[in-house]
Image (tube, helix red, strand yellow):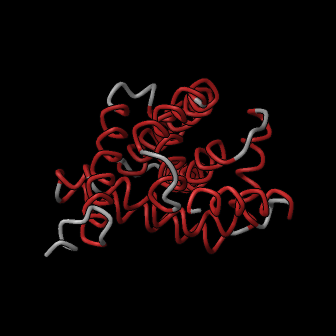
Amino acid sequence: MGDFFNVDNKFFQGLGKIIDVICLSAFWFFLCIPIVTAGAATTALYYTVNKVIRNNRSYIGREFWHAFKTNFRQSTIVWLILLLLYAIMGFDCYVMYQYAKAGVALGKIYIVFAVLMMFATMWAIYLFPYIARFENQTKMILKNAALIALGNLWKTLLLFVLLLAAAFAVYIFPPAVFIIPCVYMLLANFILEKIFQKYMSPEDLEAEKERNMEYFN
């Protein structure tokens, strides 16, 4: 009985993780409501999932707000670029689709815009985790994220399917928005970290391993 009430046992550790998942998802959701802050919120979500949820370092509140503030400017610039692209492609897709419905042959190119929006989403899947993990100029972030996405196409498609599944889950059960964002990001983290590690130097990999070991020791 004494072991059950020990806060270090697996039951309480598991319960703590569940609470962390709910809180992180809530942080992300409420900071996405103003729209303009969604990019920084997504960067902070990935950063905290990687550091706290997966590697058990520090605390969610401290790390989320640290990442949000530190990466706010760069994440917001990238997010606004994405929004502009989505707005242009979305408008063109809608207009061409209306032409297609009216029987105009040219309207069928709405499919092209739809595919471009899909590729933009795949690009976005890498952008904010990249910002969370690496320091670089904005133009290099945009370029490198695109190259990594294309260079790991099958995993990129898997991440895209996971994102669609997460969005669909929230669509059919809206309260899941307080769980799904963090769960999706955790699943994505397992895939993305393996990809990112291919582009990290041996020195950087060793330094990161030592940081994780120092926390547990």
| 30 vs 1: above or below | above
Q: Residue at x 44, y 34 (%)?
A: 38
Whether residue 105 is visible here, answered yes or no, is no
Of residue 166 and residue 41, the one placed in the foreground of this image is 41
Q: Residue at x 73, y 59 (%)?
A: 148
Q: Is residue 178 visible?
A: yes
Task: Please identify the residue farthest to the left as the structure is shown.
Answer: 1
- The residue lying at 40 percent from left, 28 percent from top is 35
Q: In x, y percent, where is residue 105?
A: 50, 53
| Residue at the outermost front position | 2
- 50 left or right of 182? right
Expressed as whole percent of the image width and height from the top left, the position of residue 103 reads 40, 52
Q: Give how far across and how far down residue 62 sits, in percent.
A: 45, 36
Q: Along the horizontal axis of the image, is 142 left or right of 186?
A: right
Q: Is residue 132 left or right of residue 114?
A: right
**Nearest the camera: 44 or 2?**
2
Quadrant of image for the N terminus: bottom left
Count of numbered circles on the image: 0
Q: Is residue 4 left or right of residue 111?
A: left
Q: Position of residue 145 (x, y in %)?
A: 71, 50
**Nearer the observer, 207 or 95:** 207
- From the viewer's perspective, is residue 61 above or below residue 25? above
Q: Quadrant of residue 84?
A: top right
Q: Residue at x 72, y 41 (%)?
A: 142
Looking at the rendered image, the quarter that the C terminus falls into is bottom right
